[in-house]
Image: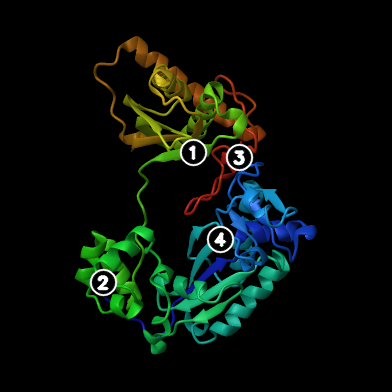
Amino acid sequence: MYKPGTIQTLYIDFDSFFASVEQQMCPHLRNKPMGVLPLDNKYSGFIAVSREAKLLGIKRGTRLVDVQKKWPKFPSVVARHDVYMHVHQDILAAMDTVIPVHKVWSVDEVECRLMGQERDNWQHLAAKIRDVLAREIGPYITPSIGFAANQVLAKIAAEMDKPNGLVCLHPKNMPDAILNIKLSDIPGIGNRMHQRLENARIINIPQLLGLSGKQMRGLWGSVEGERLWAGLHGYAVEQADTKRRMFGHGRILSPAWRNRSGVRNCARLLLVKAARRLRRQNYATGRLSVSIGFKDRARWKRKYILSPPAFDDQTLLLALERMFSSLWQTAPPTQPFKVSICLSAIVPLHARTEDLFELETDRTRRLQWEHLSSILDQLNRRYENTVISQGTHIEPPGGYTGAKIAFGRIPDKEDFI
């Protein structure tokens, strides 16, 4: 493995991104504690809070109703995922005028590779990036910038001095520069991994760095542990691209939808949204899974095998109806709370094999439905809205079904149709 003697990677993590975008767009929210909700419901937990709210100890996940006990007029807004996506695209365009973006990690995290003089003049480069972002995007959407020999260390650097931070973890200062950070500040160390390390009596960074690559691979139970070891020790490592394994969507039901018809309408809508993504990327699915969470934490799960693998709305919606036919006979007696849809066992369309036992009449009908789904997709894309659908198309309160931004996934424009 190659160990660079200088910095090679720039990592940007935008501060409190959803909340910062809202403050940039809405002057009355600027310089104030505020939060962004997934739904217009005071019992919802914030999906983002402003830096001013963080100073009060308010964290992501805190419920608005709990915050209002101390601050009755605490400002909150409902998430606008399409706005955040457009701002993200504007950020990429602005960044490209200074330095090419090597990889987009999430809607608020990007990585760039440094070349030539950029490695020596990193402070000047950071100043140029800040200037163009403030001018083109707005001064309230601030970047925390990290420089290091690789992506792992650059990401750590970007988190070390938030908000609006600038940290360079130069190889000549390593590993001393990270000895005092927390284990939880390391990418890939969540609560479960943290507990596993504690069980192995690894409680600080010096102890973690004292492990060998093989020992970390054993603790992680995969090659990711050894890859993290290489990253922490300053080697040039490339994060492996993840392979597409499924398409899925989930939704917490608003109170008015926590009933049989609400569950069905939401599940149908989530399934159609997932099927559209499936078709856009030229896949078919061999398994449909449905999960419904209830207020008492019980869960109803079912799966349906599709042979041959399907991608059209009609086949998938019929499979969903067959699964739902037994739902209320076996579901817990408590109120439904969340619905999730998953299309797995996916195969590229060019590699799909036909079912030798499928009747010719069934095959003809299926091909007709597949053709119809493609036509509907074209029409909806043309008018940038769901102008026609198979069956009811009822958006739940708050909208954005299937088009919410998640870590590692930025919705396509078509997801908002």
Residue occupied by mark 1: 250
Between the residue at mark 1 and the residue at mark 3, the CA separation in whole angstroms equals: 11 Å
The amino acid at mark 4 is Asp
Residue found farthest to the front: 69
- Quarter in which the C terminus is drawn: top right
Mark 3 surroundings within 10 Å by alpha-carbon count, few (fewer than 14), some (14 through 19), many (20 or more): some
* Disc nearer the start of the sequence (1/4): 4
Q: Position of residue 351 (x, y in %)?
A: 31, 35
Q: Nearer the viewer, mark 3 or mark 2?
A: 2
Q: Nearer the viewer, mark 1 or mark 3?
A: 1
Contact (Cβ within 8 Å) of mark 1 with mark 3: no
The amino acid at mark 1 is Gly
The amino acid at mark 2 is Arg
Q: Position of residue 129 (x, y in %)?
A: 62, 74
Contact (Cβ within 8 Å) of mark 3 with mark 2: no
Residue 412, label in figure: none
In this view, the residue in front, 378 or 308, is 308
Q: Quadrant of residue 296?
A: top left
Mark 2 surroundings within 10 Å by alpha-carbon count, few (fewer than 14), some (14 through 19), many (20 or more): few
Residue occupied by mark 4: 108
Q: Secondary structure at mark 2?
A: loop
Q: Nearer the viewer, mark 2 or mark 1?
A: 2
Between the residue at mark 2 and the residue at mark 4, the CA separation in whole angstroms equals: 34 Å
Residue 400, label in figure: 3
Q: Residue at x 44, y 85 (%)?
A: 170
Residue occupied by mark 2: 201
Mark 4 surroundings within 10 Å by alpha-carbon count, few (fewer than 14), some (14 through 19), many (20 or more): many
